[in-house]
C-alpha cells in the first residue's frame, strides 16, 4: 500500500508529459528534465496535456509505484506554470489537487508547528502548542 505523508518530498513536473510513458519513461524524465534522482523516495507528480489525469511515481526501497488518477468529469483546476521544470508540493496540497481543487487558494496551515513548555516551574511542565 502506498501512503503519502508530510515527511515525503513531492515534486510536481510543470510541463505535461506523454501518458503513454510508464515507469522507465518517467524515471528518465525525472533524471533528464527534473534533474532529480528517481530512486530518492521523492514522489514525482505528472499530468497529461489536457489535465484530465495525474500520475505519481515513487520508489519505496523495494520497487517503483506508478499510480494514475483519471478524472470522471472535468480537469485539474490548477497546475503550476513557469520556467522552472518542477515545483515542490506538500502532501496536503497534493490531496487537494487530486480532488480537483486549488491548493494555493486553500490557505492550509503548516504541516508542523513547534511545541513549547508553558509552565513557569520545572515540576509542572505541560506541552502546549505555540
Image: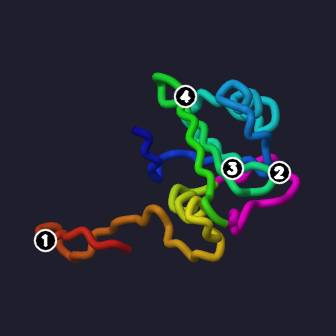
Segment tinted magenta in the rendering: 74-88
Q: Position of residue 25 (x, y in %)?
A: 73, 28
Q: Which mark, residue 64?
A: 4
Question: Of marks 3 and 1, which one's residue comes earlier in the chain?
Answer: 3
Q: Earlier in the sequence, mark 1 or mark 4?
A: 4
* Residue 24, magenta (yes or no): no
- Tell me the CA gap for discs 3 and 2: 11 Å
Q: Residues within 10 Å of mark 4 (few under 14, many from 20)?
A: some
For label 3, the residue is 12
Number of other residues with Cα within 10 Å of mark 2, as a class: few under 14, some 14 to 19, many 20 or more: few
Please tell me in which quadrant of the rendered image residue 52 appears.
bottom right
Mark 3 and mark 4: Cα distance apart in space: 17 Å
* Residue 39 image-quadrant placement: top right
Q: Residues within 10 Å of mark 1 (few under 14, many from 20)?
A: few
Q: Seen in the image, is 60 located left or right of residue 15? A: left
Q: Secondary structure at mark 4?
A: strand
Say which residue label 1 marks: 124
Pick the front one: 41 or 21 = 21
Residue extending furthest toward the right: 83
Tag 3 near tag 4, CB within 8 Å: no
Amino acid at each position: 500500500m502506498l501512503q503519502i505523508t508530510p515527511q515525503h518530498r513531492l515534486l510536481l513536473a510543470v510541463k505535461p508529459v506523454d501518458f503513454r510513458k510508464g515507469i522507465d519513461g518517467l524515471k528518465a524524465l525525472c533524471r533528464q528534465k527534473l534533474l532529480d534522482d528517481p530512486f530518492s523516495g521523492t514522489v514525482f507528480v505528472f499530468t497529461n496535456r489536457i489535465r484530465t489525469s495525474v500520475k505519481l511515481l515513487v520508489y519505496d526501497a523495494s520497487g517503483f509505484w506508478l499510480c494514475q488518477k483519471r478524472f470522471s468529469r472535468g480537469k485539474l483546476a490548477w497546475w503550476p506554470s513557469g520556467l522552472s521544470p518542477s515545483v515542490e508540493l506538500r502532501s496536503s496540497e497534493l490531496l487537494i489537487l487530486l480532488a480537483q481543487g486549488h491548493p494555493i487558494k486553500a490557505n492550509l496551515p503548516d504541516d508542523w508547528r513547534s511545541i513549547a513548555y508553558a509552565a513557569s516551574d520545572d515540576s509542572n511542565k505541560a506541552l502546549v502548542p505555540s
